[in-house]
Amino acid sequence: MSDAALPEPRRRTALGRLARRPLALLGLLIILATVLAAIAAPWIAPFGRDEQLFEGLTLEGAPMPPGAPFYLGTDLLGRDLLTRILYGARTSLVIGVVANGMALLLGTLVGVTAGYFRGWLGSILMRFTDLMMAFPALLLAICLAAIFTPSLWIVALVIALVNWVQVARVLYTETTSLAERDFIAAERAIGAGHGRILWLHILPHLVPTIIVWGTLGISTTVLLEATLSFLGIGVQPPEPSWGNIIFENQTYFQAAPWLVFFPGMAILLLALAFNLLGDALRDVLDPTQRGRS
């Protein structure tokens, strides 16, 4: 039985187990700090998002190194790097949440439908899922991004169309197992409809899995968005994202390494934070996984 279906005292026990995990708390702290920084970017950013500052370049026209008043340095156009990273956090989080939310919705719809109804409908849906899984995710994302005009929402849609297949496969397996349980057979015997069984008896047991995959999926989404933006087919300048900040400044990697190091560290820390929190949630919400890596 999942923690979503457990009494309140046992749910509090699950939260207590999560609170006793230092790495999970560290991940949660990084995520909260990133979210707060992204929300407060217009107020805490030292300069304008696209403001090109005359004093942001050296006399030779090179980017300024880290130091007051440019605490993370400036880019090749004289823009404050800290400001760009703060606004870039908004892009990464919006795409992470929106794209992963769409992927979860699509994956849940396909996986639960195929696992519950099975038969020819389940076979068609899962063969299509297997076909999508056969394509390398990055290659498929590049192809889709090349077809559509890149923008923040198009990038989110492209990533969602790539990332739903793993969720569908996992939920299909769990739904198939649940559909064969005695309590589902009893519901059918008393005349319960498909909608009642799915909403009241199948989906509540899938909530922990959806939460875990939702958390871990944001990490994958952030990395994929950064990769697409770095390749020039993701979020387009002047809209800042951590990936296109690296893309814009990659030619200055040796002369001004901070232009790549700081946005790269932001990507790494946020992805790591969601992975740490997702792993802890998996162990806490799924007793069969507890103690595994």
Image (cartoon, rainbow, N blue to C red):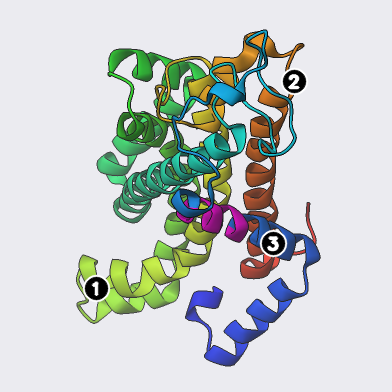
Q: Is residue 5 left or right of residue 102?
A: right
Tag 2, which secondary structure? loop
Residue 254 position in % (x across, y down): 77, 11
Amino acid bearing label 2: Pro
Compared to residue 208, the image places residue 219 above or below, namely above
Q: Is residue 91 left or right of residue 199?
A: right
Which circle's residue, 3 or 1, is located before the other in the chain?
Answer: 1
Secondary structure mostly seen in magenta is helix
Amino acid bearing label 3: Ala
Which circle's residue, 3 or 2, is located before the other in the chain?
Answer: 2
Tag 3, which secondary structure? helix
Residue 196: give its label: 1
Distance from disc 3 to disc 2, alpha carbons, whole Å, reads 34 Å
User: Tag 1: Cα neighbours inside 10 Å, few (<14), some, or many (≥20)?
Assistant: few
Distance from disc 1 to disc 2, alpha carbons, whole Å, reads 58 Å
- Within the image, what quadrant is residue 222 found in? top right
> Mark 3 or 2, which is nearer the eye?
2
Q: Nearer the viewer, residue 221 or 210?
A: 221
Cβ atoms at labels 3 and 2 below 8 Å apart: no
User: Tag 3: Cα neighbours inside 10 Å, few (<14), some, or many (≥20)?
Assistant: many
First to last magenta residue range: 32-40
Q: Is-magenta flag for residue 90?
A: no
Residue 1 visible in the snapshot: no
Q: Is residue 142 left or right of residue 265?
A: left
Distance from disc 3 to disc 1, alpha carbons, whole Å, reads 32 Å
Look at mark 3 in the image and give the residue it sits on. 280
Residue 257: give its label: 2
Residue 81 visible in the snapshot: yes
Residue 110 position in % (x across, y down): 33, 45
